[in-house]
């Protein structure tokens, strides 16, 4: 079926441009100057709306086993919620742990997703045990499984942690096969010492999750990862969930040395703080326990992160969506913050929260689209199939109402969480219509999609590989 999205303003990385968009089947086939398209029986009126590429959330953890429990969104609930928020592709993290076969971990994720996703999805692979076997598996995943990015952890000793030697070996492998190394950059062994000392002092509230993960330990790990990547012949490196000014300084310095280093941040670091959220009275702060942690409002983190987004030292905004309910899940850490499962659910709100940055004058319209859709597609080998409104691309399209308002609440969100990290926030802009591979799946707040519509997207190498 063909239809024309008419009277809207198409927004891409270079900014807004009035155009009509012709969709045929699952693809975009042409863009026309307003009013110049041939007659098509079916139309969608986009008057007053931005027509943007569907959002790509390059960092989610649906039903991830973690912290003694499992992230509360399934691929069904989480991808449906993502669709409501204008995201039409996610890249989730399949997991290999020490001693496990990488391909088995990947198969488990294919099993979790098959028939359950409402939008398209790809996988990164977490390598929790770098050894000869898992290194060999990296080659196979790149060559035949459509997986071109691998996450390593400098945090969580005994869980996902890799030491420097393991990191270097994985980086050398990535240099050979063209993959991207994604790094959780926090010094885990040092954090464990601080956590133990805090608990011994009786500092058990959620607030101390933040104080025991100081920005210096994020900056140190970021710097170490950058230098290790340089030793591995300048292999591409992508720092995930960057939260702090001093870590950003390391990325900026590396980039100005011409290094092949990239970073993402997440909405929680752009808006929420150590004092106001993690420091909420009683056990409330558990809602915002995530790692890297929220940072102090008395320092310049948020202003620096917004600047980093403008200057491209931060290339992508993802969510690190890893939701846990308060009941029975976050509550595991009452009396001991180190037992609170780490994670915040955000997948539904990223597009809106970043649009608020446009309204606040912190981002241009073009940069909004670039950081939430186009760059993630290019960074992770899905461009130009995804991330752009252009002939030949998948018809993943969001009609966005700049005059609308979005009020966020647990009562109205679609994520499987018993609270909202953004309860009561009212922000500018509103997702009006969401189209996934040509099919309208959300219209005017009404859901028209279905589990099983979403397909696996095998990915190529990053466009930013040099
Ligand atoms: N950080 C989180 O907050 N949750 C999941 C894993 C991670 O690194
Ligand atoms: Zn992480
Ligand atoms: Zn994560």
Image: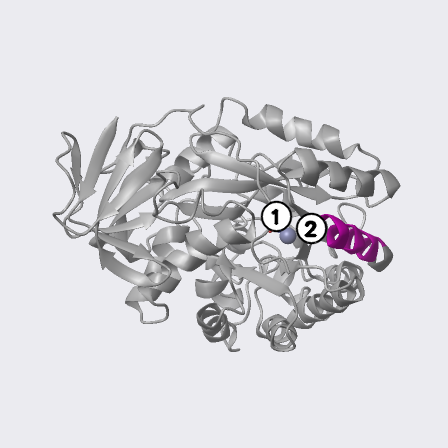
Residue at (75, 67) in percent of width and height: 230
At numbered mark 1, what does the secondary structure look like: helix, strand or loop?
loop
Q: Is mark 1 within 8 Å of ligand 3?
A: no
- The reply, left or right, for residue 363 in relation to residue 151 is left
At numbered mark 2, what does the secondary structure look like: helix, strand or loop?
loop
* Image quarter hosting the C terminus: bottom right
Q: CA distance from mark 2 to mark 1?
A: 6 Å
Q: How many marks?
A: 2
Marks 2/1 in contact by CB < 8 Å: the verdict is yes
Mark 2 or mark 1, earlier in chain: 2
Q: Nearer the viewer, residue 50 or 420?
A: 50
Residue highlighted by disc 1:
461
Most common secondary structure along the magenta stretch: helix
* Residue 209 percent location from the top left of the image: 64, 59
Q: State the extent of the magenta-drawn residues as a range.
A: 166-178
Q: Is 226 located above or below residue 37 in the figure?
A: below
Residue at (62, 57) in percent of width and height: 465
Residue highlighted by disc 2:
178
Q: Residues within 10 Å of mark 2 (few under 14, many from 20)?
A: many
* Residue 313 percent location from the top left of the image: 54, 69
- The reply, left or right, for residue 98 in relation to residue 51 is right
- The reply, left or right, for residue 39 in relation to residue 265 is left
* Residue 61 percent location from the top left of the image: 57, 41
* Image quarter hosting the N terminus: top left
């Amino acid at each position: 079926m063909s239809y024309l999205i008419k009277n809207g303003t198409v927004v891409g990385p270079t900014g807004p441009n009035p155009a009509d968009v012709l969709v045929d089947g699952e693809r975009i086939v042409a863009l026309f100057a307003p009013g110049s398209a041939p007659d098509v029986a079916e139309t969608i009126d986009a008057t007053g709306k931005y027509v943007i590429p569907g959002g790509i959330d390059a960092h989610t953890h649906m039903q991830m086993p973690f912290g003694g429990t499992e992230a509360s969104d399934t691929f069904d609930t989480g991808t449906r919620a993502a669709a409501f928020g204008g995201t039409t592709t996610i890249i989730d993290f399949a997991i290999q742990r020490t001693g496990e076969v990488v391909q088995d971990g990947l198969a488990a994720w294919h099993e979790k997703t098959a028939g359950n996703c409402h939008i398209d999805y790809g996988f990164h692979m977490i390598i929790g045990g770098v050894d000869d076997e898992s290194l060999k598996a990296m080659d196979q995943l790149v060559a035949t499984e459509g997986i071109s990015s691998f996450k390593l952890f400098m945090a969580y000793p005994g869980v996902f942690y890799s030491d420097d030697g393991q990191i270097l070996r994985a980086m050398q492998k990535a240099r050979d096969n063209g993959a991207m190394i994604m790094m959780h950059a926090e010094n885990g062994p040092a954090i464990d010492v601080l956590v133990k000392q805090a608990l011994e002092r009786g500092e058990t509230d959620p607030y101390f999750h933040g104080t025991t993960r100081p920005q210096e330990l994020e900056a140190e790990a970021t710097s170490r990862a950058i230098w290790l990547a340089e030793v591995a012949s300048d292999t591409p490196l992508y720092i995930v969930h960057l939260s702090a000014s001093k870590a950003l300084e390391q990325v900026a310095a590396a980039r100005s040395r011409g290094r092949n280093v990239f970073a993402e941040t997440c909405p929680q670091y752009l808006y929420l703080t150590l004092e106001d959220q993690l420091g909420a009275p009683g056990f409330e702060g558990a809602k915002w326990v995530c790692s890297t942690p929220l940072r102090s409002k008395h320092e310049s983190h948020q202003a620096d992160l917004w600047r980093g987004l403008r200057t491209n030292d931060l290339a992508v905004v993802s969510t690190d969506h890893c939701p846990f309910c308060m009941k029975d899940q976050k509550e595991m850490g009452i009396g001991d913050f180190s037992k609170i499962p780490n994670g915040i659910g955000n997948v539904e709100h990223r597009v809106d929260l970043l649009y608020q940055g446009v309204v606040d004058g912190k981002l241009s319209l073009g940069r909004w689209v670039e950081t939430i859709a186009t760059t993630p597609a290019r960074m992770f080998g899905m461009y130009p199939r995804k991330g752009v409104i252009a002939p030949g691309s998948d018809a993943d399209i969001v009609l966005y109402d700049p005059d609308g308002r979005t009020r966020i609440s647990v009562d109205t969100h679609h994520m499987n969480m018993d609270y909202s990290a953004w309860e009561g926030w009212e922000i500018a802009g509103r997702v009006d219509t969401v189209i996934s591979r040509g099919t309208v799946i959300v219209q005017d707040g009404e859901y028209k999609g279905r589990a099983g519509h979403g397909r696996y997207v095998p990915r190529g190498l990053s466009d930013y590989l040099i």
